[in-house]
Amino acid sequence: MMKKNTNNCKINNHHAPKNNVHGAPTKRWISLVSQRFSLRDYSFCMATLLVFCLGSLFYQLNGGPPRILLDLRLYLGNSTFLDDHGPPTPKVLPFPSQVVYNRVGKCGSRTVVLLLRILSEKHGFNLVTSDIHNKTRLTKNEQMELIKNVSTSEQPYLFTRHVHFLNFSRFGAEQPVYINIIRDPVNRFLSNYFFRRFGDWRGEQNHMIRTPGMKEEERYLDISECILQNYAECSNPRLFYIIPYFCGQHPKCRDPGEWALERAKQNVNENFLLVGILEELEDVLLLLERFLPHYFKDVMSIYKNPEHKKLGNLTVTVKKSFPSPNALQVLYQRMKYEYEFYYYVKEQFHLLKRKFGLKSHVKAPPSEEISIPVPVPMETEEPIEDEDSQDDEKWLEDIYKR
């Protein structure tokens, strides 16, 4: 006859005598529980219960589960996530959500980037900047790497760097919207010439950092002598500077000539939402605010803030002087393609201003500036009535679809 196992943990209540429900079976159950649960186990259970209660309270006070728990459930693939909450709400992006500002050197870009840093904090877009300032021409592999890095940035983003135009679609990426600002070519050249030698009012000795190997006689070389004596810095192809930013990375874009000029114009028409001119910067900012409000809303109030003006004044090039009239005339002749492009952009910009009802706000040049004897560009005809009545938003949609 087999001996009954008194340590059997299975309790079958339906085998217990009905008249002893509160007797021996109950005592036996308590005895078994006390054997299996120590004080440490009891403390763990109570702690778990406390966490559960606090989590429930947090749930009720916040109208739902904490975001981190939802993210964790989604990551772990819990099937009840979609049942309880539906699919995650997609992030609604502004349009366009990919903008590139391939800023031309010495065309007010430091002022604009300073504004963008404030605006990115204010409006929550991703400002992607580059620490590379002196490499505008890229190899094919460098182009691919840069486009990959920019295209995978969190949207909405605004990428800015001194770099010649990049064709994203050539490498299978979505083409972003481009913006840029240019200025009078001779004034841009002079600003760069003296900035490389003497820096600006920030007092950072940045000219010594940028040109550490420049000899003293070169640093103090008279600008007129540089032009008239055909120093490399003051002659082609160094003077062919603005057009390649719009022409692109093709080797012919660096050769002064009609091919690069026409390709630059074509890219302005097809890939740039706006190319403004520095001489009318306030109108540029007003149009940017109109076209890209999710990036540039309230930009004018920031730009006109006295504290921002103080910072902006620190970026003005110091020790700037002007060449003789003869040297200026020679310089202009060497930059004839640059001026043809500048006047083309200026004409398009003025047409855009009239379309949106902006009057020119052109500041008179400082008294020490010498006007350059250049032909006056042809006046752009006023838009016809049908164009005036065209809906502005529809016009912007057409621009974005390019």
Image: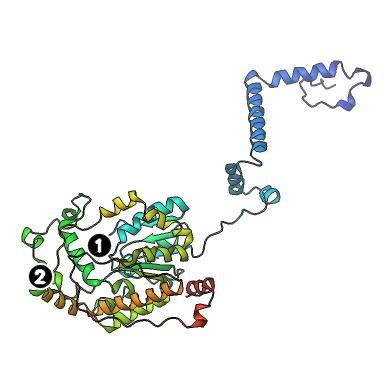
Q: Which residue is mark 1?
A: 134
Secondary structure of residue under mark 2: helix
Visible in this render: residue 156? no
Q: Is 32 above or below relative to 252? A: above
Q: Residue at point 57% right, 42% down?
A: 68
Viewer-nearest residue: 370 or 256: 370
Disc 2 residue type (three-letter): Ser
Q: Is 43 above or below relative to 324? A: above
Q: How is the image coloured?
A: rainbow
Viewer-nearest residue: 369 or 242: 369
Disc 1 residue type (three-letter): Asn
Q: What is the x, y in percent for residue 369?
A: 19, 67
Image quadrant containing the N terminus? top right
Viewer-nearest residue: 241 or 170: 241
Q: Quadrant of residue 214?
A: bottom left
Q: What is the x, y in percent for residue 390?
A: 53, 77
Is 172 situated left or right of 310 in this image?
right
Q: What is the x, y in percent for residue 278?
A: 31, 66
Q: Which residue is mark 2?
A: 224
Viewer-nearest residue: 170 or 368: 368
The local crowd at label 1, few if under 14, some if 14 to 19, many if 20 or more residues have their Cα within 10 Å, is few
Q: Is 377 above or below relative to 357? A: below
How far apart marks 2 and 1 lie (CA) works out to 26 Å
Visible in this render: residue 125? yes
